[in-house]
Image: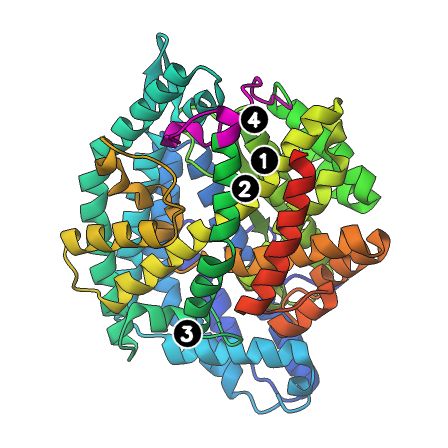
Amino acid sequence: MRKSFVPEDLVINKAEDLKALYDTLLQTQVSSEANLRDFLLDVSDLESFISEDMAWRYIRMTCDTQNKDHENAYLQFVQHIQPELAPLEDQLNQKIVGIPYWQSLLKEDSFAIYYRSLKSAVELFREENIALQAEVSTLAQEYSAAQGAMSIAWEGKEITLQQASNLLLETDPEIRKKAWLLIQERRQQDAEKLDALFTKMIGLRHQIALNAGFDNYRDYMFVALGRFDYTAQDCKDFHTSIEKNAIPLLKEVHLLRKSQMKTEVLHPWDLQVDPLQRKPLKPFETGEELRDKAIAVLADLDPFFAQCLQTMKEKSLLDLSSRVGKAPGGYNYPLARTNMPFIFMNATSNLRDVETLLHEAGHAIHSFQMAPLPLNAFKNTPSEVAELASMSMELISMSAWNHYFSETEAWNRAKTEQIEGVIGTLPWIATIDAFQHWIYENPTHSAEERKAQWKHLLKRFGTGMVNHEGYEHFLDYAWQRQLHLFEVPFYYIEYGIAQLGAIGIWRNYLEKNSQDSLEAYKAFMKLGYTRSMGEIYETAGVKFDFSAAYVKELMDFVGSEWSKSVE
């Protein structure tokens, strides 16, 4: 076995602890193609070590946002360690790009894509941006802490907003309305503070873009995110495709809901409750039950899938239940050096939690599938590829949701809710992405202009069938619940692109040979990021395409499956 470049007992307390390793790499003489391959393995080992150290700091902080030691460890990394390492990383990237033995390696797709990303990173790097990026990371942590601290009082107890959202499934409209109002009022308390924080972030991000020679932060991020396979205009075409083809289907969903609820008006607290007044689906009681049933679902699809989650269970790499002080949301965080991921989420015993865990399980399986790839860079998949793995798992796993729902009626209800979630998600993705484009194309806009643009987009991508009369002010800042805007800007359209791909995989699974579809699914995951996005999607058996014609084709299929589920 090849000896690790990074000492096994190394602990990172400060940037200085890593500088000797960077110096060694920077001074290494690369004299042949074989030397270059070995050198890149050492670089990968260092990258993986640093990535995993950062991962655990982030994981511990999000698992307990009230623990100051965890917060300080994370902030120490983003405010001090990362900024000091950034110039060294740039020097190393410059060295790698300048090595004269790439010719043969570049004939291999995997190395060509890696080299392209490295070259882009070198072109983007500006030393004056280091401090600005650290400041943005600090502001993002302020947002995360603010979100984690949000809770409401309900029947004498303090509950998180995630837990409170379960009340929107109650059949009593007064309970739903009361809970919805409490959630909105709690968010409203921090709305202006978060609005001001976001304005600061926009200014910093715009300056980062200007420093790097770009007209705006959107254009900067397209390069930073490695969007070599599509353009900003393609994103705007996606928005139009969704507007034309997904929103009419969502209107059908809302019309049926109105009919089933026997109401002339749909209120915002009426969108999650079962329209036939059945009690909320409760697929599990505890985080442990959620986990174990997910393992059973995955086993029905493929034994390897189940083994991945079983391994994470045995290694304590799952934190699933919601609690006060825990950051919102859910994620799968790859541990780059140990080649195993960590799943974080906020389960509160509803169907959405099942979807979330199976989504994150798709990411986790992807991590396990990529483990044999030799370089960490080959495993750094763009989100359009990463989310294809997770969103596909949500859909294909529905065939085994009987482990959560023993009765056919409940199982069908769960499928209906999942499909309606897909239909409703695409317009929301278009709304958030269009909002980001406008924000960074117009970086000097006022808070009032931002509010007006947001309301315009809500109207453009809405069905016009939900009545907010008397509560319109809650819509002004509804975007603040989307953490991507604060923490990972422009990381959202990927969900839409991947959702279309996932629908294609699901269609293949149902209409073609299911086993062949699963093999294609596994095959694309094994590629990591060693091919273009188009080739990766083709390996998965679907198109990398979000034109109006293709979106209509997929929406027709989704509409057909939805109609079957509500019969």
Helix, strand or loop at disc 4? Answer: loop
Q: Residues within 10 Å of mark 2 (few under 14, many from 20)?
A: some
**Where's residue 31, x and y in %?**
62, 89
499 relative to 332, above or below: below
Q: What type is the residue that disc 1 sits on?
A: Glu
Location of the N terminus by quadrant is bottom right
Residue marked by disc 3: 233
Position of residue 301 in the picture relative to residue 136 (left or right): right
Furthest residue in direction top, as rendered: 156
Q: CA distance from mark 2 to mark 1?
A: 6 Å
Marker count (numbered): 4
Residue marked by disc 2: 421
In reply to whether residue 281 is colored magenta, the answer given is yes
Q: Residues within 10 Å of mark 4 (few under 14, many from 20)?
A: some
Q: CA distance from mark 1 to mark 4?
A: 11 Å
Observer-side mark, 3 or 4, equals 3
Q: CA distance from mark 4 to mark 2?
A: 14 Å
114 relative to 330, above or below: below
Q: Earlier in the sequence, mark 2 or mark 3?
A: 3
Quarter where residue 563 is shown: top right
Helix, strand or loop at disc 1? Answer: helix
